[in-house]
Image (tube, rainbow, N blue to C red):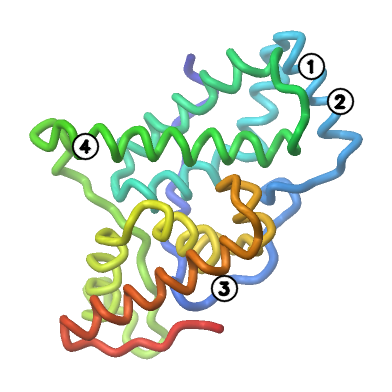
Amino acid sequence: MQIGPPLEDRSRISFFEKGGNLPDSDRPGGPQDDEAKLLEECRAGNVSAFEHLYEMHGARMKSIAANLLGNLADAEDAVQDCFLKVYRGAASFRGASRLSTWIYRVLVNSCYDMLRKRRRYPLEARSEGETLVSIREPVTPASDHPLRLSLEACVKDLEPRRRAAFLLFEVEGFTHREVGDILGVPEGTSKTLLFEARRELQRLLARRGVVAAARS
């Protein structure tokens, strides 16, 4: 099920510098009345409602998937897989969480599925077009800055849940409450996963002889 055109690449955001508040349409939250109405339309199978969901969240979903998977082509596949699951599951969704939160959770789980498949079938994993989130260095803006390249390589080696928590918080700009909702864990667990991710990154960077300061 193809909804909308290919998404723009919004994955080039700083690791350690949160870029301000996200628009309401890009956050797991949003006006509850509007979301409740949209949910009812999705439950009824209204295609225009799913297209509206795509317009609201598609670009942010593409960014999250690209950062988790490190591959824009795989990110496109994950977003489409997510919307197919949402389309099939909307009728049975009972609203235990917000619709937007559920969508992001489905997306992250789709990314996890793709990562597990890569581990089972490594020869089938995509090797071209690998694209991890990039760091904008204010002093040295060159695209091949050593710190950026080292961080990209180290983040790729993080355990999937830690990587997700790190990217959702540090790169995508979600709060710990939102990260917990998306990952299906308590807010405290989100903070723990971020702490563990930072600690592991420091260890991996030190092994490369690189030192970087993370945001508190």
The label number, if any, that marks residue 41 in the structure image: 1
Residue in the image at 41% along x and 32% along y: 78
Give the residue type at disc 1: Glu
First in sequence: mark 2 vs mark 4: 2
| Residue in the picture at 75% in, 51% down | 24
Q: For marks 3 and 4, give the CA distance.
A: 30 Å
Residue at numbered disc 2:
37
Q: How far is mark 2 from mark 1, CA to CA?
A: 6 Å
Q: Which residue is mark 3?
A: 18
Q: Amino acid type of disc 4? A: Arg
Q: Secondary structure at mark 1?
A: helix
Q: CA distance from mark 2 to mark 4?
A: 38 Å
Q: Residue 21: image x %, image y %?
A: 69, 66
Q: Residues within 10 Å of mark 2 (few under 14, many from 20)?
A: few
The reply to whether callout 1 and callout 4 are in contact (CB within 8 Å) is no
Q: Measured along the vertical axis of the image, is residue 129 above or below residue 48?
A: below
**Circle 2/circle 1 CB separation < 8 Å:** yes
Q: Is residue 87 above or below residue 33?
A: above
* Camera-nearest label, 2 or 4: 4
* Nearer the observer, 137 or 33: 33
Q: Nearer the viewer, mark 3 or mark 4?
A: 4
Callout 3 touching callout 4 (CB < 8 Å): no
Q: Position of residue 25 (x, y in %)?
A: 72, 46
What is the three-letter code of the residue carrying label 3?
Lys
Count the marks. Answer: 4
Q: Secondary structure under badge 2?
A: helix
> What whole-number distance in Å separates the C-alpha atoms at marks 2 and 3?
32 Å
For the residues marked 1 and 4, what is the alpha-carbon distance in whole angstroms?
Answer: 36 Å
